[in-house]
Image (spheres, rainbow, N blue to C red):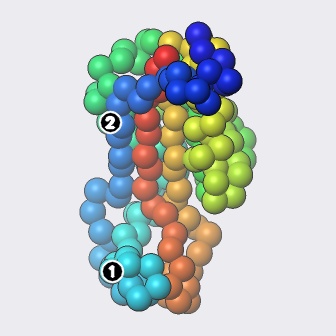
């Protein structure tokens, strides 16, 4: 197994076996609003239905990543979710995803690091695979519908989707 020093010399610490994304399946009527395209390049925003939660977005992306990877869900050893918009503080979003995917024996935790939550979670996931984990499910999920009032945001960009990756050694 390569060390971090070996990784700096080009020895891989792991691989992405599969990627998955999930976004709200349909626009909520009236939710498409012009955004500051001159500032962000985003021409419209999709607002998730109020019944769609951060864990459900995350689980949707996780299912897509598992399908794309060819890795069995039974081989997953860890679920890490990077998010700044958990629906509840306890249980963690990762634990709620673990329950939705019916993986009771898989370790799971959230990593909160403001806008860099997904990158911080990726860093941790890489280290778990380098330490010998067979497969780590990494998820970045945001659903800020309960946190912001879109009409008054004036060009700010907020997420309502999830992306997931299966990392293997």
Q: Badges 2 and 1: C-beta atoms under 8 Å apart?
A: no
Whole-Å distance between the Cαs marked 2 and 1? 26 Å
Percent position of residue 112, x then y: 70, 48
Q: Which of the two residues, 76 or 101, is positioned nearer the viewer here? A: 76
Q: Which of the two residues, 98 or 9, is positioned nearer the viewer here? A: 9
Q: Residue at x 30, y 68 (%)?
A: 27
Q: Residue at x 51, y 23 (%)?
A: 12
Label 2: element kind: helix
Relative side of 154 to 22, left or right = right
- Residue 82 in view here: yes
Percent position of residue 152, x then y: 55, 89
* Residue 127 picture quarter: top right
Can you say whether 7 is above or below 51 in the image?
Answer: above
- The quarter of the picture where the N terminus appears is top right
The residue indicated by pointer 2 is 64
Percent position of residue 107, x then y: 63, 21
Relative side of 117 to 37, left or right = right
Can you say whether 81 is above or below 78 in the image?
Answer: below
Relative side of 74 to 54, left or right = left
The residue indicated by pointer 1 is 43
- Residue 106 in view here: no
In this rendering, the label closer to the viewer, 2 or 1: 1
Q: Which of the two residues, 109 or 30, is positioned nearer the viewer here? A: 109
Label 1: element kind: loop
Q: Residue at x 59, y 75 (%)?
A: 148
Which sits earlier in the primary sequence, circle 2 or circle 1?
Answer: 1
């Amino acid at each position: 197994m390569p060390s971090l020093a070996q990784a700096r010399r080009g020895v891989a610490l792991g691989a992405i076996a599969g990627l998955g994304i999930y976004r709200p399946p349909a626009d909520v009527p009236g939710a498409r609003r012009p955004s500051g395209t001159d500032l962000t390049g985003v021409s419209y925003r999709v607002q998730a239905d109020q019944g769609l939660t951060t864990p459900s977005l995350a689980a949707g992306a996780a299912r897509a990543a598992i399908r794309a990877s060819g890795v069995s869900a039974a081989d997953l050893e860890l679920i890490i979710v990077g998010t700044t918009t958990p629906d509840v503080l306890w249980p963690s979003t990762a634990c709620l995803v673990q329950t939705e995917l019916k993986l009771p024996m898989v370790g799971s935790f959230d990593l909160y690091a403001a806008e860099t939550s997904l990158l911080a979670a990726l860093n941790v996931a890489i280290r778990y695979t380098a330490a010998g984990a067979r497969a780590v499910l990494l998820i970045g999920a945001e659903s800020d519908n309960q946190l912001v009032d879109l009409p008054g945001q004036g060009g700010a960009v907020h997420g309502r989707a999830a992306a997931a990756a299966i990392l293997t050694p």
